[in-house]
Amino acid sequence: MSEHWDAIVVGAGTMGVAATLELARRGKRVLAIDRFGVPNDRASHHGATRFFRTAYFEHPDYVPLLVRAREGWARLEAESGERLFERTGMLLIGPRGGAIVEPTIESAKAHGIEHEVLSRADVRARYPMFEVAEDSIGVYEPGAGCLACEKAIGAMARLARGRGATFLEHTPVVDWSADARGVAVRTAGQTYRADKLVLTQGAWSGELARELGIKLRVTRQVMFWLAPPGDGPSAPPGLPVWAVETKAGADSEEDAGGVTFGFPLVLGEKGLKTCSHTPGRVSDPDALDREVTDADERPIRAFLSRHAPALDTARLDARVCMYTMICDEHFVIDRHPRHENVVIACGFSGHGFKFAPIVGATLAYLLLSDGFGPPHFTLARRASA
Ligand SMILES: Cc1cc2nc3c(=O)[nH]c(=O)nc-3n(C[C@H](O)[C@H](O)[C@H](O)COP(=O)(O)OP(=O)(O)OC[C@H]3O[C@@H](n4cnc5c(N)ncnc54)[C@H](O)[C@@H]3O)c2cc1C
């Protein structure tokens, strides 16, 4: 492949495939390179499902982006003919003054998002599978639901190929350089040249981050799939996607508190997926311990036995994934400060998947225009923080 491309995308995972599709939609000739397959179960986008919610406790500024992202997912479903989103509603439970429920309510109110505030008694009556702590309340967003993550990446890649994009899989990029004439991207066997470069390397963004003065931490996150307690495809009845914030248990060291989240049996899930949102052990993505041990399971069991005993069922499967955490948990999406023709997106801090269509569109926009990116996510903002 000695041809010259309009753009090369390094890292064809969640954000890289979304950017590839956006560039291909704009008529650009794109080469997307990934060290694994597209999709794959080595990076941060595996495990069948991801939440999509619009009322956003992380910061209300994300809401307009989520509205655009939801349009992007709907367009992707229409163009691919595949079912990628299932509306299940989302329930959040947590203490008053905590990190998730009241900020979600504020964000919903500020942006007019349909939601219901639930008292402790309301939650207990409607969702008897949860034991709600004395000081806790709930909020329900009926428009939220699940995205099929690997399936969505596959659909974006297929559509991008249909528009002329080329994917090079199982090919690690070892180096890149850029100057005013263009960019060069090196793999073990070859050098590829293009006008522009997109760097979306997920957990492998460490070297770039160091060069840019950003601190990233890759953490080990374990996903558990548990047996549904009742019969039927969506058992137990009425279970939406959920997240529960708890305080540490007084009588159990394993029950450290934090946010735990889970999914109902939708979009081909093999069990009720349950995970802790607390960043796990800091890890090297190339030496990630993928063996799941009893020690990994104990905190989840401690949470379930105290707060959701009806969901404390047999383990069907468990897999290891990664978060790429940045100090304030807000993404970086920007031009490279020294190379006008290079754009970067990293630090998605365990909540990026749902944004993929708008991140892809933003990267394409940054690459093809002279405009500025979303101020919230720029490197300049980070330098002044
Ligand atoms: C357990 C878990 C649950 C989550 N739940 C949610 C959720 O409910 N909702 C939500 O919105 N988000 C969620 N997330 C977060 C979301 O999945 C991530 O933020 C998102 O997938 C990150 O996308 P990315 O493109 O940065 O990384 P990835 O999708 O991992 O893509 C990076 C790609 O770059 C490739 N790559 C890296 N270096 C190179 C190189 N040198 N050469 C070639 N290729 C390279 C990798 O192989 C990889 O495919 C969750 C994450 C985990 C782990």
Image (spheres, rainbow, N blue to C red):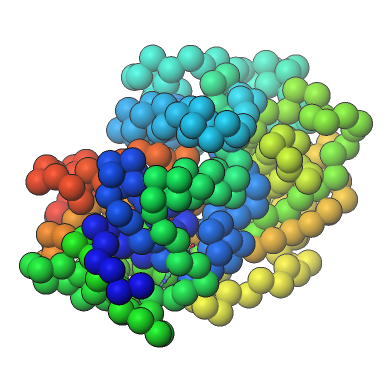
- Is residue 177 depicted above or below 227 in this figure? below
Residue depicted at 57% across the width and 31% down the height: 81
- Is residue 187 depicted above or below 366 in this figure? below
Q: Is residue 360 visible?
A: no
Residue depicted at 45% across the width and 61% down the height: 167
- Is residue 195 depicted above or below 192 in this figure? above
Q: List x then y, in percent, for residue 357.
A: 40, 39
Answer with left or right where residue 55 lies relative to residue 337. right
Which quarter of the figure is the C terminus placed in? bottom left
Residue depicted at 28% across the width and 68% down the height: 3
Answer with left or right where residue 128 lies relative to residue 157. right
> In which image quadrant can residue 338 be found?
bottom left
Which quarter of the figure is the N terminus placed in? bottom left
Q: Nearer the viewer, residue 29 or 54?
A: 29
Looking at the image, which residue sits at the far right? Answer: 231
Q: List x then y, in percent, for residue 349.
A: 43, 53
Looking at the image, which residue sits at the far bottom? Answer: 188
> In which image quadrant can residue 10 be found?
bottom left
Answer with left or right where residue 83 lies relative to residue 16. right
Residue depicted at 25% across the width and 71% down the height: 193
Q: Is residue 350 visible?
A: yes
Q: List x then y, in percent, for residue 160.
A: 43, 47
Q: List x then y, in percent, for residue 299.
A: 70, 57
